[in-house]
Amino acid sequence: MPSAKKCETPPNDTDGPRMDVNNALMQALACVVAAYLIGSLSFAVIVSRMMGLQDPRTYGSQNPGATNVLRSGSKAAAVLTLLLDAVKGWVPVFAVQRLPGMGEGADAVLAACALAAFAGHVWPVFFRFKGGKGVATAAGVLFGLEPWLGLATMATWLIVAYFSRYSSLAAVASAVFAPAFYLLGARVVWSGAPVIALAIGAMSAVLLYRHKDNIARLIAGKESRIGSKGS
């Protein structure tokens, strides 16, 4: 008698694509978490400790950022803080754009990583979720997204800061202009993506909210100028 044929289950054609999607989701999640952890490194505190300076959260505006570190009297510490805070915003955004396998969701992952790095600075897990205002880190993120966008925003900050001597006013102006610069340059200087525009808008909104006390002091004429010892 002829041997009975074994009943074989036909391969599921959807298994491959499903695994690819799962792998992409896991990779995206890992990138976002890594971006947040990198952003959570508060270099104002770290640099101050390494250089034997007072914790920036205990004087001036009590904000762990480069402007407040400058009030310690150490320009080197302030510059180093500024650069490192910017770099930690740039690194995750730059790196994720060079990862393979992101596919159609690449813009969404990029936007999520940008927001995560920025959020890490503002709400750092390593420092009890009490971070800085995010100006330098946001600048690093913008440079990572589009170098020309970063340059335009940085130029805005420098011009306003030079003529007004108010770091907070320069930050507010940059936060307002950054989304406008991105939209104006979309499809002209860079390709542009709605999800990236939303991420930049969200960062700008948080920056403005974090500067609400500064805005009130600016209106009242009580805001400290760059290099002053006040709050």
Image (cartoon, rainbow, N blue to C red):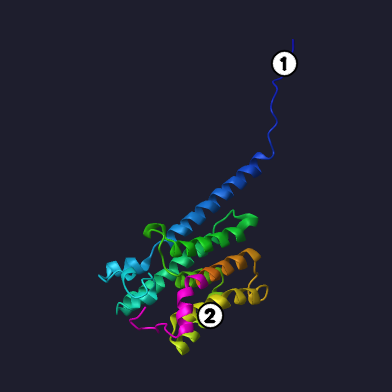
- Crowding at label 1, few (<14), some or many (≥20) Cα neighbours within 10 Å? few
- Residue at the spot of label 1: 4
What is the x, y in percent for residue 38? Answer: 43, 60
Front position among marks 2 and 1: 2
At label 1, which amino acid type do we have? Answer: Ala
The answer for how far apart the CA atoms under marks 2 and 1 are is 79 Å
Q: Secondary structure at mark 2?
A: helix
Residue farthest to the bottom, as pictured: 163
Judging depth in this view, the residue of 181 and 210 nearest the camera is: 210
Can the viewer see residue 165?
yes
Left or right of 161: which side holds 15?
A: right
Q: Earlier in the sequence, mark 2 or mark 1?
A: 1
In the image, 69 versus 99, the foreground residue is 69
Task: Measuring from the top left, give residue 130's x and y in whole percent.
Answer: 40, 63
Residue 26 vs 201, above or below: the answer is above
Instruction: Specify the segment rendered in magenta.
Output: 208-231
Q: Residue at x 40, y 74 (%)?
A: 82
Tell me the number on the disc at residue 173.
2
Farthest right residue in view: 1
Residue 210: % across, % down = 47, 70
Q: Nearer the viewer, residue 43 or 97?
A: 43
Asked if one can make out residue 148 in the rendered structure from this viewpoint, the answer is no
Quadrant for residue 11, please give it. top right
Q: Quadrant of the N terminus?
A: top right
| Quadrant holding the C terminus | bottom left
Location of residue 147 with respect to 114 vertically, above or below: below
**What kind of residue is marked 2?**
Ala
